[in-house]
Amino acid sequence: MATIRRLDRGDGVELAWMLTEGRSPTVVFLPGFRSDMTGDKATALATYCAERGQAILRFDYSGHGASGGQFEKGTIGRWAEDALAVVDQASEGPLLLVGSSMGGWIALLVARARRERIVGLVGIAAAPDFTEVLMWQAMSFEQRATLMSDGVLHVPSQYGDPYPITRELIEDGRDHLLLQAPIALDCSVRLLHGQCDPDVPWEFALRIADQVGSRDVRVILVKDGDHRLSRPQDLSLLRQTIAALLDENGA
């Protein structure tokens, strides 16, 4: 049974992570915006990896789950650095990245930064560039003015309490946009996306596939799937997708 461990990222903020030892490549789960390593997909994936003896690494970004830090101080760049810090500290050898929603954006950034270690990447409703395309561009003039003057805008969420969007999140996100230029990756890429996703349009998967340099890219659309893709049949599809990639890499 994996236990939560902690890594000081260098500024006093501790990142929580869990590693289950097993065969290589290590599966790395990257959670979504305001999600953590105890969600349905993360725990289902951990159970699956344990059953097949596969190594799996899970963690929480700063301001999320069991990690320290304030959510409001987080940005895409900061959370990508968190992911790299945990990956570099807690794992060795080849990696198979699995990113959900925002985690798909972070996974692409991690894969680009550690290309030599990445054998595959699975995006689940992957949402690169969402701070610009789905947040900033969707705001009214009044909302943008509030964000720029106050530094934060609280927006309602169907998944819980209203959450803060900070000016720093939006401005930092622009430094990490991916969909306007080729993404220099040559690993296997699988993109799962529900066509009933109310949060991230399924066309994002097509845009990612178009920009990724690898020739081994497949988009798998779930016609009645929502954003979370955490129903039993969705989790079964995720397991099948990951199993095929692991088998291709000798695991």
Image (cartoon, grey):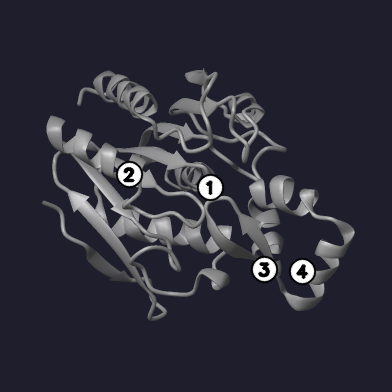
Residue 107 to residue 69: above or below:
above
On the question of residue 37 being in view, the answer is yes
Residue at 56% over, 35% down? 184
Please name the amino acid that badge 4 sits on: Leu
Q: Quadrant of the C terminus?
A: top left
Callout 1 crowding tier (Cα within 10 Å): few <14, some 14–19, many ≥20 = many
Callout 4 crowding tier (Cα within 10 Å): few <14, some 14–19, many ≥20 = many
Query: Mark 4 to mark 2: distance in Å?
Result: 32 Å
Residue 140 to residue 178: above or below:
below
Q: Quadrant of residue 75?
A: bottom right
User: Residue 132 at what x, y percent from top left?
Assistant: 72, 50
Disc 1 is placed on an element classified as helix
Disc 3 is placed on an element classified as helix
Please name the amino acid that badge 2 sits on: Ala
Callout 2 crowding tier (Cα within 10 Å): few <14, some 14–19, many ≥20 = many
On the question of residue 24 being in view, the answer is no
User: Residue 44 at what x, y percent from top left?
Assistant: 27, 38
Q: Nearer the viewer, mark 1 or mark 4?
A: 4
**Residue corresponding to mark 3:** 168
Residue 212 got which mark? none
Query: Which one is earlier in the sequence, the residue at label 1 or at label 3?
Result: 1
Disc 2 is placed on an element classified as helix
Please name the amino acid that badge 3 sits on: Glu
Residue at 53% over, 20% down? 221
**Residue corresponding to mark 2:** 42
Query: Which one is earlier in the sequence, the residue at label 4 or at label 2?
Result: 2
Please name the amino acid that badge 1 sits on: Met
**Residue corresponding to mark 1:** 102
